[in-house]
Image (spheres, rainbow, N blue to C red):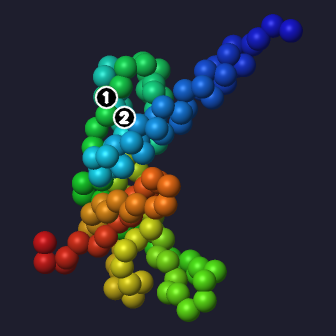
């Protein structure tokens, strides 16, 4: 049975989407302590999550750029943990300029957070060399 154009495109997308893009994202997060994504060299479209190709023009030449500056809290809630007597985790939807939204843990007391609050990146090291982004509320004086 012959491959259709859709099969070929799906195969290429599965091969490219999230593979080396994700590796590059976590490598930069771990080594440089920066939140990064890719930007197309041709049309300058910023893709998040990172891609090996531009989802806007399909160009396969991209640069890595730092993102996260100017992040603001868009929404937040709490999530209880399974461990007894621990405070619930705060999970938020973070708005990142020129990128959009991402969910991430928020380091702050639930009752002290406000929608629109400025946030800065903090990288959390987990067991096994894993890292995750977390956002910390900035002082209201800054």
Q: Is residue 43 visible?
A: no
Are the residues tagged 2 and 1 within 8 Å (C-beta)? Answer: yes
User: Mark 2 sits on what residue?
Assistant: 38
Tell me residue 102's x, y (percent). 45, 56
The residue under the point 76% across, 11% down is 3
The residue under the point 29% across, 73% down is 137
The residue lying furthest to the left in this view is 142
Instruction: From the viewer's side, name the closer residue of 57 and 8.
Output: 8
Instruction: From the viewer's side, name the closer residue of 13 and 95.
Output: 13
The residue lying furthest to the bottom in this view is 85
Q: Is residue 106 above or below residue 49?
A: below
Left or right: residue 46 versus residue 93 is left
Q: CA distance from mark 2 to mark 1?
A: 5 Å
User: Mark 1 sits on what residue?
Assistant: 63
Quarter of the picture containing the N terminus is: top right
Tell me residue 122's x, y (percent). 31, 63
SS of the residue under disc 2: strand
The residue under the point 49% across, 60% down is 127
Other-residue count near label 2 (Cα within 10 Å), few / some / many at <14 / 14–19 / ≥20 = many
Tell me residue 75's x, y (percent). 44, 70
Q: Is residue 55 above or below residue 88?
A: above
The residue under the point 37% across, 20% down is 61
SS of the residue under disc 1: strand
Q: Earlier in the sequence, mark 2 or mark 1?
A: 2
Instruction: From the viewer's side, name the closer residue of 45 and 53.
Output: 53
Q: Is residue 49 visible?
A: yes
Q: Is residue 128 above or below residue 59?
A: below
Tell me residue 64's x, y (percent). 31, 34
């Amino acid at each position: 049975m012959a491959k259709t154009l859709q099969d070929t495109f799906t195969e290429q997308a599965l091969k490219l989407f999230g593979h080396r893009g994700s590796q590059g994202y976590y490598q930069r997060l771990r080594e440089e302590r920066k939140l990064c994504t890719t930007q197309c060299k041709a049309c300058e479209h910023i893709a998040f999550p990172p891609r090996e190709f531009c989802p806007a023009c399909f160009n396969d030449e991209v640069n890595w750029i730092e993102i996260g500056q100017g992040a603001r809290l868009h929404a937040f809630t709490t999530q209880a943990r399974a461990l007894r007597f621990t405070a619930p985790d705060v999970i938020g939807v973070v708005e990142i300029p020129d990128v959009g939204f991402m969910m991430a843990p928020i380091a702050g007391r639930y009752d002290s957070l406000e929608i629109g609050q400025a946030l800065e990146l903090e990288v959390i090291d987990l067991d096994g060399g894993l890292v995750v982004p977390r956002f910390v509320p900035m002082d209201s004086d800054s």
